[in-house]
Image (tube, coloured by chain):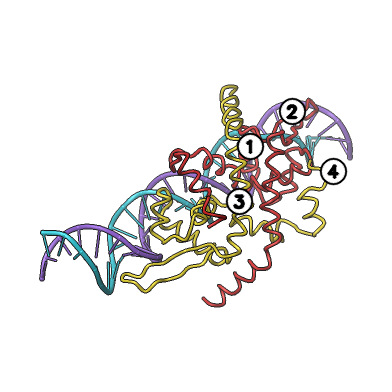
Chain colours: A yellow, B red, C cyan, D purple
Amino acid sequence: MRDSGSSIRDAWEAAGYTPDNCPVRSILDHVAAKWTVLVLIELDAGPRRFSALARALPDISKRMLTQTLRELQRDGIISRQVFDTKPPSVEYALTALGQSLTEPLFGLVTWAELNREPIFAAQAAYDAAG
Amino acid sequence: MRDSGSSIRDAWEAAGYTPDNCPVRSILDHVAAKWTVLVLIELDAGPRRFSALARALPDISKRMLTQTLRELQRDGIISRQVFDTKPPSVEYALTALGQSLTEPLFGLVTWAELNREPIFAAQAAYDAAG
DNA sequence: ATCGGAGGTCTCATATTGAGACCAATACAC
DNA sequence: GTGTATTGGTCTCAATATGAGACCTCCGAT
């Protein structure tokens, strides 16, 4: 329970959100997805071309990279600009909206970094206990 | 690019993290998973029994609820306490570690709430353009 | 007697994801 | 001029993850 009982859940209830009708859930589904976070972290370091992203994240398939980028573009979080080179190259970059997202994202990543010791310790203890 | 070029990615590179060897990625995979976020939001409102969670999140299957709870328990983010009632009941609650996680999580959720208008507008524009 | 709820597990159907071939146009090495 | 590589994808097929729902034991209430 967080400070004095005002929880996210209570706020959602007050706003009349149900699982079927929760705008935040639908956004979170995109933003908190596995590859999304990693792509955004990479783009936070600067604009990147498709193949540069693919090289930076060697374990994502082109298929999922494309899909992730399309979704983020549709949400207005990243921009996609085609350059008329031969062959044409495509540059992805964070929009202003996307840049505003990196701050809370930073919070999560920092938390993970700060707490990796206790987490790994907890995992080891759990596995040892069976 | 965020203020003066210090990005998450650069920090990871400096720390020598590769995709295969990135402790933060492995933690993020758990924390930023679809159901994890929703379960944590519910538990942030207070301890809950298994079936209470199932009722609060009607669109998660028991199977995935169990799996999500086990994973969070293994990470030391939630605790699991069995009460010797008949039939026995099980209560899940955030640990101190879990409570510390709700703050950055709050950040993300708040961002989603704050920006749902521009996001939905961007989606509509994208879909209209084809 | 049977119905229900507690907290799961198990199986099987479906959805999502990954691996990798393929594409057209061009540039560069040879 | 022939071969190879790069660009940003798409397509197919196999592997994996998820969802739906039956099933379990133990009890108390009807």
Q: Residue furthest bottom?
A: B129
Callout 4 amino acid:
Ser
Q: Which residue matches tag 1?
A: B72
Asked whether the residues under marks 3 and 1 belong to the same chain, the reply is no
Give the quadrant of residue B53.
top right
- The span from disc 4 to disc 2 (Cα, nearest Å) is 26 Å
- The span from disc 1 to disc 2 (Cα, nearest Å) is 16 Å
Provide the secondary structure element on which disc 1 rests: helix
Q: Residue at x 40, y 55 (%)?
A: A54
Name the side, left or right, on which B70 lies relative to C17: right
Callout 2 amino acid:
Val
Asked whether the residues under marks 1 and 2 belong to the same chain, the reply is yes
Task: Assess disc 4: are there few (<14), some (14-19) or many (≥20) residues with their C-alpha within 10 Å of its C-alpha.
Answer: few
- The span from disc 4 to disc 3 (Cα, nearest Å) is 25 Å
Q: Which residue matches tag 3?
A: A105
- The span from disc 3 to disc 2 (Cα, nearest Å) is 35 Å
Callout 1 amino acid:
Leu
Task: Assess disc 3: are there few (<14), some (14-19) or many (≥20) residues with their C-alpha within 10 Å of its C-alpha.
Answer: many
Pair 4/2: label in front:
4
**Residue B31 point in image, percent of width and height:** 61, 43
**Residue B22 point in image, percent of width and height:** 48, 39
